[in-house]
Image: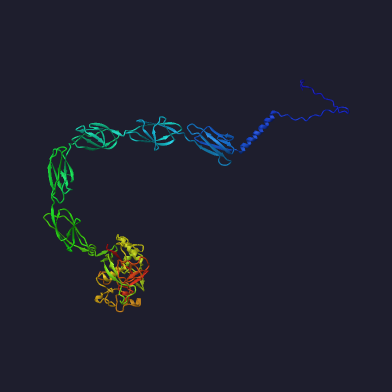
Amino acid sequence: MSEQHERIQPAGFQPPGAGGKAPPRMALALPRWQPWHIVMVLALALLALSLWFVLTARAVTLEFSPAVEQVEVSGGFSLRVGARRLLRPGEYAVKVQAAGYQPLSQTIQVVSSGDGVFRFALEKLPGRLQIVTRPAAAAVEIDGKDAGAAPAEGYSLTPGSHEIVLRAARHQVHTQRIDIEGMDRVQTLEVALVPAWAEVKLTSSPAGASVQVDGADIGTTPLKAEIGAGNHRVEMRLAGYQKWQGALDVVANQAQTVPEVALAPLRGTLRVSSDPTGASIAAAGTFIGRSPVNVPLLPGRETEVVATLPGHKPMTRTLTLASGAEATWQPKLEPILGEVRVTATPADAELLIDGTSHGQANQTVSLIALPHRITVRKAGYVDFQTTLTPRPGMALEVNARLLSEAQEVAARTPSQITTAAGQRMVRVPAGRLRMGAPRREQGRRANELERNVELTRAFYLSVAEVSNAEFRAFRSSHSSGIVARTTLDNDSYPVVRVSWADAVAYCNWLSQRDGLPLAYRGDRLVTPANTGYRLPSEAEWEYAARFAGGRNLKYPWGDLKLGGDAMPPSGMVGNYADASARKLLGEGLESYDDGYDAAAPVASFKANALGIFDLGGNVSEWVNDRYSTALMPTSAVESDPLGLANGSVWVVRGSSWRHSHITELRLSYRDSAAAPRDDLGFRIARYVE
């Protein structure tokens, strides 16, 4: 040990004596805080705080488009770790500024879950567009909106594409799209506008003519003028000369010289007013117009002027007029006449010429040699009309024989027609009939009340019932079947086992094939009835069967006046339930044999006076009318009856191969049906017009 250190000497022990004082009591000595102790405590606290922050904070990524360097985040402690920041959950304000972009200030919400990525897109600052035009001060339109004259500082425009339209007087409109970069950058658009006019040189002979373009004076010839591009109407005027007119097509920015215009001296004027008016006027062989008209004539030149009018003699005048002189000519044209002799039957018919009455038709008239409409008419008859042109020195004759309305219809329509399916039809004239049968007629039924009917329209009726072959052209799958081993299905046999609706559908199909209007819409006849194929009305059927031949028939085979009401029939007069049908039906006419057990080929027996077959016998027939037993006797005349508007049962007319009794064989017999039968078919009808 070094000499410099103090030596420690031992002290003697002295116990407390009885009379002495006790030694003083020593106090407890506490350690003293040194500075390093405080540092240590603070370090531990800071470490605990940091550990707490790290454990409770989220790693957050702030992504910017475009990328930025300086980002300010406020609202809590933020620790940047590489490209990420540690932020405790809560709300923070993010502020960014970048050159050329709008300042960004946005609030974000940091939560304890999620990907922790926040993306920001900075918006570019507007750019400035300076527009320089030649000529200056052009009107500017940006994106369809008027922007006025271009300001010196330019336009502030959002980044992106913009449409610029520039307009200046007498220049073509300029349209252009330009992309604005933005970011407060300045862009310049320089445009030299294209002139919308051109320099045009105009001259005339002689010179000094005033010039108008589209009605506006622009000077006198010779001249140079700036005229807008496009098509223009040009006029030149000079005293003593005719006005010159022409068209001028100006191309922008392309100068042109118009060929010299030779002005024609002013013409004289001849005012022509003829009697009668409307004469054709020609000068020097050129048609001018119809009188009254002004005729321009070349000055100092002899000119021939001619006036002509159909049916009149022409007139000519030759004259010479000075420049600007006027004259008048009033030619009176002489008519050319011819005679027309008109005779008519009936003799008291009226004569009309060009719509004007000239009294009774039997006379001779003098008419101008022009086409005339000759009409001869009388009430109750169809007008006779013709057009003719009289000739001088030659008498024309018109012989008008008037026809009644029925005669006229018959004359202009064929007596027979053929359908597209090959069926022959005969024309049945209009007329009157008394339907039904008198009360005391043997075999009469209660539904055969007598009625007075008038058919006002002629109609066509098929001469035969529709056959299987004809119906299968419409519906190929149809079969008429068999009855007791006897076929009903041969092609030439009448079609059976068809409903009323089937028959109507066939009529509409046939109308389409012949290009006629459809007669039926659903199960209703079109109103008013047209010329399409249809089923005959009950009145038409009975008229054709009993009266249209000029006779009143009781049975299909004879005339009452000639003893044709005998039963049973004799000879081969139709297909009825005869002796050979007894094995099939159990009954039949004992002394009559038509040779067929059931159906027979259509038109196998003698036709009636109209040339129509099987209106009695073979098969019964559907007609158009719905059936009703509520018919009431009346003295009134019914016109073109078509039956009830509603109902599901239809009238059936005519006997069939199943019938042999007086009741069914009479032509006034009325039956009804709602469903097909093996002895029920149909024939077709249509109006003539």
Q: Identify the residue at the far bottom of this view.
A: 590
Q: Is residue 333 left or right of residue 48?
A: left
For the N terminus, which image quadrant? top right
Residue 271 placement (x, y as % from top left): 16, 43
Which quadrant of the figure has residue 439? Answer: bottom left
Give the total of numbered labels.
0
Residue situated in front as seen by the camera: 671 or 85 = 671
- The answer to whether 63 is drawn above or below residue 15 in the figure is below
Q: Indicate the quadrant where residue 17 lies.
A: top right
Whole-percent x and y of residue 519?
32, 62
Residue at the right extreme? Answer: 18
- Find residue 667 and report its horizontal and vertical position in percent: 30, 73
**In this view, 108 is above or below 572:** above
Taking depth in this image into account, of 83 and 2 the one nearest to the observer is: 83
Is any atom of residue 614 visible in this view? no
**Residue 100, percent from left and from top:** 47, 32
Q: Is residue 156 left or right of residue 544?
A: right
Q: Residue at x 23, y 36 (%)?
A: 235
Extreme residue in the top direction: 3
Above or below, 271 relative to 651: above
Looking at the picture, the colour scheme in use is rainbow
Whether residue 337 is visible, yes or no, is yes
As drawn, which residue projects farthest toward the left? Answer: 393
Quarter of the picture containing the C terminus is: bottom left
